[in-house]
Image (cartoon, helix red, strand yellow):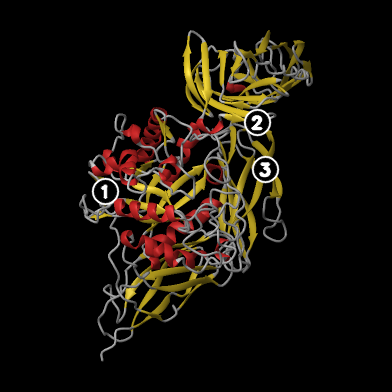
């Protein structure tokens, strides 16, 4: 028996994603599937298009799923246009060797049971309170839930103490809720006069519902008379003091003087302040004599020395006589003046260190085939992939056995100058609970969200001379690229993808540590044209928010039937290049792997491995070699235990160094092709990592293989770390400015800096790390200091910390 099922995972009106599942009880060795369709397929995975014309589509198997065993299944996915009401495919026919001629009809999908009817919504109406001078009372009519068909209900006004024609305008009518709509307003006109008459009411009654059931049928409109002076009360505040009593003064005013006395009652009520503990309760009647327009009400506040947040007390007005309440409540704020004290501890004595290679300077851009820094110097990015933020761990891996800063400093010591940091859209846009972390080893990560961990990584990378490439690895948290091979999946739509990149670009704008956006990892399910258009939309959106970033665009999986690595095929960029609003920010970023990751046919030809340089060049290298744009190979890696892998490694490192035919001579001058090795993590099943399984030992074999293209190892600069603390946690944010000040050490010995520390409520400790400037000059032990100033929410008890720099340049 042959069965076929068709479904849609999403439909955006002008297009949709379709899935086809072909079940068979007979073994197939090559197959073709035909059907009638009212749409045009523009991108497909799991099959190839033979033809589509006059509403008839014919597909054939992909190379890897030609053989389907008996009882097996073939899966096909595609994107097509248009979407919306276009009908599902029909008239399915399967042709395969051994099935006979003509092609065999395939059973259509089993009809889906009709949805369970939804109960009709309830209809309710809410009352309203308005001033007579507002001129209209708006009643809100609502449904308990949206209906799939129109819902109609009639209404009519009913007099109360307010009279139709004299106080309001009688009205009848009906409202209709469109499908999906849940709220409608009915406006009833009011008659604004100059007659003092007190508060009045009338009602609006609902009747005759169709498509729904009546719940609350009647709602009352309360019309407040505002003829005569309006009574206003203003908010007030007072500083608490350390003892005794302070006056919290509320001012009550009339909108105009009256010829008769105006009276209003008042009473205090607890806010966050408590009567008897923080203030003395008070109530009474306030009298405005004829001609008076302003009176004060004083509430006594009780002072103390308790560090606490600002507190509030309410003063309420009621029962106005010969006047109308415009405000009936005021907020009194008792401002706390009991503050914690700030203390600065000396930094631990630290050795000066020795200078290493110069780092990249400022924001990066491109010039021809080169990536250049802010000085115009050509640079090669030699990055390492540190994955985990894209998985359900919601944090980089390895933190269960090591400190995160320690691992980053090891990366810098080994010679890498950047980190490619994979993440998921779910981690950024929905958050998640980071796990798999030993918080005894990583106490400063406790309680942080995924994006806050990303912030910490960016901050420390800047301190130790590393740069960060942000890589959108997948949509939902998990392993590998998106299953559909596209840049969107499920609830994480293209619109949300672009918005995510805009938010990240804004978040790190002005921070030179983050150098670029790898827009999406391995879009292997897309054709080059579709992916190029999406990449331009996202790339230009990023640059509008952050013009300093590089935009990294990966390849697809196949182009015009020529298959390569997922994300590695950039052949289509020759005829359809990426065009950004800032052309000097484009970097192409293919992926390239060896035989052990997947045994591609080109690893088994007679001319292997000499065929590889030309293959690299055709798939992605030509863009760099011809000077179209720089290339950064975003993923390349191996365990280097397969002899074919070692041959690949020799050829690709030669190519990246500019030796495009691997004859030992540099053919293309300059810094060479940039790259990001996969991976730092030892838990990558395909490639292993730079680190061994203990997450500490280094795989020296891999470092030796990377040596021709690895920058000279740079020593992470030493830092003097000051601790600034509060004697007690604040109940509101506490801030204090800081700056370095010279002693016997001056700005040739350390990087002068200044800033502001902000303690969140409950926090009592912050650190300031000052980077030292290493040299080879014998100069003895020196010192400088960190000075605090301008505290807000605290007082300074000890505002100076000393850092001593131990010289390590000795005279023999």
Q: How crowded is mark 3: few (under 14 residues within 10 Å), some or many (20 or more)?
A: some
So how many labels did they put on this image? 3
* Residue labelled with disc 2: 69
Of residue 23 and residue 179, the one placed in the foreground of this image is 23
- The spot of residue 199 in percent (x, y) is 70, 25
Please identify the quarter of the rendering in which residue 71 is found. Answer: top right
When the figure is inspected, residue 578 is found, relative to residue 85, above or below; the finding is: below
Q: Residues within 10 Å of mark 1 (few under 14, many from 20)?
A: many
When the figure is inspected, residue 276 is found, relative to residue 127, above or below; the finding is: below
Instruction: Confirm whether residue 755 shows in the render.
Output: no
Callout 1: helix, strand or loop?
loop
When the figure is inspected, residue 496 is found, relative to residue 96, above or below; the finding is: below
Mark 1–mark 3 Cα distance, whole angstroms, equals: 83 Å
Earlier residue among tags 1 and 2: 2
* Residue labelled with disc 3: 316
Of residue 446 and residue 553, the one placed in the foreground of this image is 553
- The spot of residue 480 in percent (x, y) is 54, 45
């Amino acid at each position: 028996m042959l069965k076929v099922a068709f479904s849609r995972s999403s439909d955006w009106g002008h297009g949709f994603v379709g899935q086809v599942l072909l079940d068979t009880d007979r073994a197939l060795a090559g197959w073709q599937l035909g059907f009638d369709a009212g749409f045009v397929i523009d991108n497909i995975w799991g099959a190839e298009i033979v033809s589509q014309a006059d509403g008839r589509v014919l597909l054939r198997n992909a190379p890897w799923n030609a053989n389907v065993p008996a009882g097996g299944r073939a899966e096909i996915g595609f994107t097509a246009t248009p979407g919306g009401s276009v009908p599902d495919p029909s008239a399915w026919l399967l042709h395969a060797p051994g099935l006979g001629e003509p092609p065999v009809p395939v059973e259509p999908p089993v009809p889906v049971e009709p949805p369970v009817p939804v109960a009709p919504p309830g209809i309710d109406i809410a009352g309203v309170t308005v001033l007579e001078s507002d001129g209209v009372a708006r009643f809100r009519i609502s449904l308990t839930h949206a209906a799939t068909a129109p819902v109609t209900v009639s209404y009519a006004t009913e007099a109360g103490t307010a009279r139709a024609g004299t106080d309001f305008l009688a009205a009848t009518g009906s409202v209709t809720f469109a499908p999906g709509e849940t709220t409608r307003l009915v406006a009833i006109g009011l008659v604004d006069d100059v007659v003092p008459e007190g508060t009045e009411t009338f009602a609006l009654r609902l009747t005759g519902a169709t498509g729904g059931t009546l719940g609350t049928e009647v709602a009352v409109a309360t019309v407040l008379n505002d003829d005569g002076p309006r009574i206003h009360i203003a908010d007030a505040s007072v500083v608490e003091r350390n003892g005794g009593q302070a006056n919290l003064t509320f001012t009550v005013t009339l909108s105009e003087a009256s010829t008769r006395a105006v009276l209003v009652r008042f009473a205090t009520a607890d806010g966050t302040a408590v009567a008897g503990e923080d203030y003395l309760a008070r109530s009474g009647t306030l009298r405005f004599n004829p001609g008076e327009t302003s009176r004060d009400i004083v509430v006594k506040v009780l002072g103390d020395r308790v560090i606490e947040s600002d507190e509030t007390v309410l003063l309420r007005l009621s029962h106005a006589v010969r006047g109308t309440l415009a405000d009936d409540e005021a907020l009194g704020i008792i401002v706390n003046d009991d503050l914690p004290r700030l203390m600065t501890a000396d930094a631990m004595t630290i050795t000066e260190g020795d200078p290493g290679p110069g780092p990249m300077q400022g924001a990066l851009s491109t010039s021809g085939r080169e990536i250049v820094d802010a000085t115009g110097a050509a640079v090669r990015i030699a990055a390492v992939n540190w994955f985990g933020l894209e998985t359900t761990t919601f944090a980089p891996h390895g933190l269960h056995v090591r400190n995160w800063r320690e691992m980053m400093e090891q990366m810098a010591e080994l010679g890498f100058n950047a980190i490619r940091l994979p993440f998921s859209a779910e981690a950024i846009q929905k958050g998640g609970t980071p796990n798999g972390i030993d918080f005894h080893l990583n106490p400063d990560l406790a309680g942080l969200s995924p994006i806050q961990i990303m912030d910490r990584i960016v901050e420390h990378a800047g301190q130790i001379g590393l740069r960060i490439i942000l890589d959108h690895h997948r949509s939902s948290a998990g392993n590998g690229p998106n299953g559909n091979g596209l840049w969107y999946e499920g609830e994480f739509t293209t619109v949300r993808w672009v918005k995510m990149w805009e938010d990240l670009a804004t978040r790190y704008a002005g921070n030179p540590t983050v150098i670029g956006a790898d827009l999406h990892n391995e879009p292997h399910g897309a054709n080059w044209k579709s992916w190029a258009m999406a990449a331009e939309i996202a790339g230009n959106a990023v640059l509008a928010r952050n013009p300093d970033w590089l935009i990294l665009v990966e390849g697809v999986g196949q182009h015009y039937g020529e298959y390569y690595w997922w994300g590695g095929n950039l052949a289509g960029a020759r005829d359809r290049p990426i065009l950004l609003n800032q052309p000097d920010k484009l970097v192409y970023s293919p992926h390239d792997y060896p035989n052990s990751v997947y045994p591609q046919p080109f690893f088994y030809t007679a001319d292997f491995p000499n065929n590889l340089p030309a293959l690299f060049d055709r798939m992605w290298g030509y863009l760099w070699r011809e000077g179209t744009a720089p290339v950064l190979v975003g993923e390349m890696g191996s365990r280097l235990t397969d002899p074919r892998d070692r041959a690949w490694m020799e050829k690709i490192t030669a190519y990246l160094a500019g030796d495009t035919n691997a004859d030992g001579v540099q053919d293309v001058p300059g810094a060479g092709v940039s790259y990001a090795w996969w991976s730092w993590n030892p838990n990558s099943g395909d490639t292993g990592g730079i680190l061994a399984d203990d997450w500490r030992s280094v795989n020296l074999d891999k470092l030796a293989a990377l040596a021709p293209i690895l920058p000279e190892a740079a020593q992470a600069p030493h830092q003097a770390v000051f601790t600034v603390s509060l004697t007690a946690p604040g109940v509101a944010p506490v801030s204090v400015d800081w700056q370095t000040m010279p002693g016997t050490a001056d700005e040739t010995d350390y990087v002068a800096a200044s800033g502001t520390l902000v303690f969140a409520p409950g926090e009592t400790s912050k650190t300031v790390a000052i980077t030292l400037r290493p040299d080879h000059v014998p100069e003895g032990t020196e010192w400088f200091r960190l000075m605090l100033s301008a505290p807000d929410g605290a007082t300074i008890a000890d505002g100076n910390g000393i850092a001593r720099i131990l010289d390590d340049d000795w005279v023999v």
